[in-house]
């Protein structure tokens, strides 16, 4: 991904828009992306200014240089007159575009469409140590690395993302993704291997005979991009329809929870979309095992059984029960359990108690993104121990808040910037339709546009396929949108 890709993306967007009589400026306005001015003139995309930069000085270490770490580094580089920034990141392609993995697994994009080199996006002012942090030592203001010894800091920003725990499912390892009908979009190679499996599944349905079974899971932990387990199901449905084979396939979603979405309005919209597509769902099913040789998924099904009559409450006691349920599959899409990386979880920085949403993740004040116990530590992105927001869309709102508060601290001022919990799920509901589900702490819809957010729209598909990627690479990672 370099700046010529931005030109190509914009050209492709123009072709699509022209068919509908829209200009790029109008489309960006319609999509509420008026700030994405770099998309109107990509050739000046790399220009930046240091107007009103702060003279405050301190050594800032950023743990993890993915979406969040890179955006923070770029913003600080622009807004400090003498930046002293070190990024510690092991993966040379940590900034790659993860939302595109859903498109890879469904044959819309290839790996080349999402991979990018850190060196093209990290600001030149930042020093990059290509290494892993093996220990956080916030009492002594330093981190330990695998190969480069201790690195000291005045301020630390934790942006290590999260850990995928495939092996928490009995009989499954990450290496098994791509074999025996088991796909998963949560890492780049997994998404590449999922596309042939989806094609085999579609072909098998097309061949006729016994109805084929597609099984899609959602675990009992917080996950990044809560909509992704359903997006891949919608896209499987779309590929089956395209092949004229939908009638010979059963598609069933098995979420561990008891609803489709935490926001009531979006839950209702999704139920309707599932019904319209004849897609099935079974709540309270948590994937705990896989027998790959027999192609059987094993779930813990949580349910309530009616107990004794309670005289005091005037109702029956409801007893929580669990039973094992075995489900045969031809195609199994696994969304693995996720947690904070072990190095974060085991460190003094993490919440030692807390809810599922916060336990083990970095202990933060949810609006300032400031650590509640260590005054020179901040965190954002997937590793943040806040009630919601494990999406790139949240990072886009968080990084400027965090940086403004960090600079205020460096200047000895009060922190005043606040994150409102905004997050967004562009729910891909077909090849050509997306519902843009935006919400915040209130668990209510928080649309950026005067349009019903629960409606599936072609304009959001365009936004997703053509505009969000350049927004990510040339807006967010460059610290300007
Ligand atoms: C399939 C899929 C679909 C998605 N769809 C969407 C979408 O449609 N919209 C949306 O907004 N978001 C989406 N997301 C989520 C989005 O990609 C993430 O929320 C975002 O990347 C989080 O940024 P981050 O920097 O916190 O984590 P990451 O981008 O994962 O970066 C974390 C970095 O930390 C590094 N790291 C880890 N451990 C260490 C260590 N010990 N030392 C040093 N560095 C370390 C890692 O190598 C990594 O580069 C999707 C994600 C996936 C997987």
Image: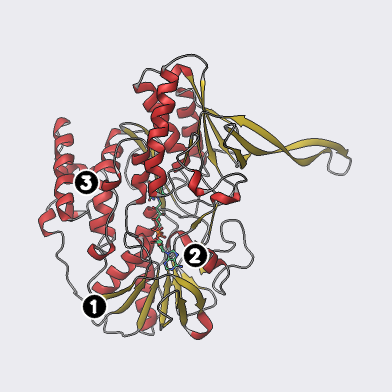
Q: In percent of the image, x 26 and y 53: which residue is there? A: 471
Query: Mark 3 and 2 residues: CB-CB less than 8 Å, in contact?
Result: no
The disc at residue 366 is 2
Q: Nearer the viewer, residue 178 or 459?
A: 178
Ligand 1 placement by image quarter: bottom left
Residue 51 x %, y %: 18, 74
Tell me the CA gap for discs 1 and 3.
Answer: 29 Å
Q: In which quarter of the image is residue 61?
A: bottom left
Could you classify mark 1 by the number of other residues whose Cα lies within 10 Å: few (under 14), some (14-19), or many (20 or more)? Answer: some
Does the beta carbon at disc 1 come under 8 Å from ligand 1?
no
Q: Is residue 444 visible?
A: yes
Residue 100 x %, y %: 33, 45
Which residue matches tag 3?
28
Query: Mark 1 and 3 residues: CB-CB less than 8 Å, in contact?
Result: no
In this view, 313 is above or below 180: below
Circle 2 sits in a helix, a strand or a loop, which is it? loop
Q: Which of 394 and 31 is in front in this view?
A: 394
Residue 311 x %, y %: 89, 40
């Amino acid at each position: 991904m370099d700046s010529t890709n931005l030109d190509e993306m914009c050209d492709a967007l123009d072709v699509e828009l022209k068919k509908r009589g829209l200009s790029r400026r109008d489309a960006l306005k319609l999509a509420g992306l008026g700030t994405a001015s770099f998309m109107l003139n990509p050739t000046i995309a790399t220009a930046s200014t240091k107007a009103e930069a702060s003279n405050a000085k301190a050594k800032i270490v950023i743990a993890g240089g993915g979406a969040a770490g890179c955006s923070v580094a770029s913003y600080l580089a622009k807004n400090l007159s003498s930046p002293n920034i070190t990024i510690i990141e092991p993966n040379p392609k940590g900034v790659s575009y993860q939302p595109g993995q859903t498109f890879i697994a469904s044959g819309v994009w290839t790996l080349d469409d999402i991979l990018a080199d850190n060196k093209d996006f990290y600001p030149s002012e930042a020093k990059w140590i290509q290494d892993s942090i093996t220990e956080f030592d916030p009492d002594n203001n330093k981190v330990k690395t695998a190969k480069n010894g201790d690195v000291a800091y005045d301020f630390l920003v934790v942006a290590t993302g999260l850990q995928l725990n495939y092996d928490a499912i009995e009989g499954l390892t990450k290496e098994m993704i791509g074999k025996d009908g088991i796909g998963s979009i949560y890492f780049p190679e997994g998404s590449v291997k999922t596309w042939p499996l989806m094609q085999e599944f579609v072909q098998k349905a097309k061949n006729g005979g016994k109805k084929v079974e597609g099984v899609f899971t959602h675990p009992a932990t917080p996950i990044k991009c809560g909509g992704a387990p359903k997006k891949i199901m919608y896209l499987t449905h779309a590929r089956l329809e395209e092949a004229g084979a939908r009638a010979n396939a059963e598609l069933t979603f098995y979420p561990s929870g008891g609803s489709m979405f935490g926001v009531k309005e979006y839950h209702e919209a999704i139920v309707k979309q599932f019904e319209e597509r004849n897609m099935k769902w079974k709540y309270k099913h948590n994937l705990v095992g896989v027998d790959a040789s027999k192609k059987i998924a094993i779930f813990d099904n949580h349910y309530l059984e009616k107990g004794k009559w309670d005289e005091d409450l005037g109702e029956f006691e409801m007893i929580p029960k669990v039973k094992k349920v075995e489900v045969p599959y031809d195609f199994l899409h696994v969304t693995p359990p996720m947690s904070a990386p072990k190095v974060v979880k085991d460190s003094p920085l993490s919440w030692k108690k807390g809810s599922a949403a916060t336990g083990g993740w970095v202990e933060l004040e949810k609006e300032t993104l400031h650590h509640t116990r260590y005054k020179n530590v901040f965190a954002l992105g997937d590793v943040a121990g806040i009630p919601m927001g494990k999406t790139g869309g949240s990072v886009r709102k968080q990084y400027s808040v965090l940086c403004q508060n960090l600079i205020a601290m460096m200047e000895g001022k009060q922190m005043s910037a606040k994150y409102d919990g905004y997050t967004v799920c562009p729910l891909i509901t077909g090849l050509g339709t997306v519902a843009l589900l935006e919400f915040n702490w209130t668990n209510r819809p928080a649309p950026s546009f005067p349009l019903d957010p629960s409606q599936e729209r072609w304009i959001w598909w365009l936004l997703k396929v053509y505009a969000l990627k350049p927004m990510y690479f040339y807006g967010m990672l460059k610290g300007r949108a």
